[in-house]
């Protein structure tokens, strides 16, 4: 069980830490989208549902056959993984430290290198510079209201891409821990 939780956390945090970079460009609109995520190191590909409401994020996907939901509260700098393991419903809370950084922090954005359309939305393509990215850079396609729709890594391909997208008001209950979940504190990363 610990391995599954750690694997789920690691996979989801690679995307969810978008919300924790200092000086990050947070989305200015509520939305929901389906994304395809490709892990180039393992070759694993998966789909995930992502939602945003007022600076908070929700991601839902399946990892090693186990469904998991990640809730990210930006204001409290807290990430919560919701899992149901054979009837045991757990909310694993992990505080996010200042050491977490993502390519979407303002200081990591390089030049504008073009425009594109992803999932029916026009977006600006930026060069993202980060030594933790293979080759030191990626290309991120972001809307004018700061919604990331695609991230490509040169010579490796697409790492993250919206396949379905809509700006829509999101119910607040989707961004909180439901009744019946046992809360557990996990150390920050």
Image (cartoon, helix red, strand yellow):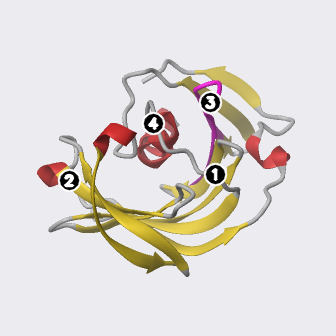
Q: Which residue is mark 1?
A: 28
As helix, strand or loop, the secondary structure at mark 4 comes to: helix
- Disc with the residue nearer the chain's start (1 vs 4): 4
Quadrant in which residue 21 is drawn: top left
Quadrant in which residue 88 is drawn: top right
Q: Which residue is mark 3?
A: 92
Q: Main secondary structure of the magenta part?
A: strand
| Position of residue 104 measured from the top left corner of the image (x, y, whole percent) | 40, 46
Residue that appears at 42% across and 24% down: 189
Looking at the rendered structure, which numbered label has been put on residue 6?
Answer: 4
As helix, strand or loop, the secondary structure at mark 3 comes to: strand
Q: Which residue is mark 2?
A: 137
Q: Is residue 68 magenta?
A: yes
- Disc with the residue nearer the chain's start (3 vs 4): 4
- Disc with the residue nearer the chain's start (2 vs 4): 4
- Disc with the residue nearer the chain's start (1 vs 2): 1
As helix, strand or loop, the secondary structure at mark 2 comes to: strand
163 lies above or below 49: below
| Position of residue 30 measured from the top left corner of the image (x, y, whole percent) | 70, 56
Q: Which residues are magenta?
A: 66-82
* Marks 1, 3: nearer the viewer: 1
């Amino acid at each position: 069980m610990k391995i599954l939780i750690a694997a789920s956390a690691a996979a989801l945090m690679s995307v969810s830490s978008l919300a924790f970079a200092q000086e990050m460009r947070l989305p200015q609109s509520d939305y929901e989208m389906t994304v395809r995520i490709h892990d180039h190191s393992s070759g694993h590909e998966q789909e995930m549902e992502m939602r945003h409401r007022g600076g908070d994020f929700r991601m839902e996907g399946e990892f090693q056959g186990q469904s998991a939901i990640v809730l990210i509260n930006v204001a409290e700098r807290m990430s919560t993984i919701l899992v149901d393991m054979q009837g045991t419903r757990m909310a694993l809370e992990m505080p996010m430290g200042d050491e977490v950084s993502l390519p979407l922090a303002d200081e990591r954005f390089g030049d504008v290198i073009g425009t594109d359309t992803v999932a029916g939305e026009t977006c600006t393509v930026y060069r993202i510079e980060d030594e933790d990215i293979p080759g030191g850079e990626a290309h991120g396609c972001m809307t004018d209201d700061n919604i990331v729709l695609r991230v490509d890594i040169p010579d490796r391909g697409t790492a993250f891409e919206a396949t379905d997208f809509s700006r829509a008001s999101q119910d607040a209950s989707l961004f909180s821990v439901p009744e019946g979940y046992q809360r557990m504190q996990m150390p920050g990363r």
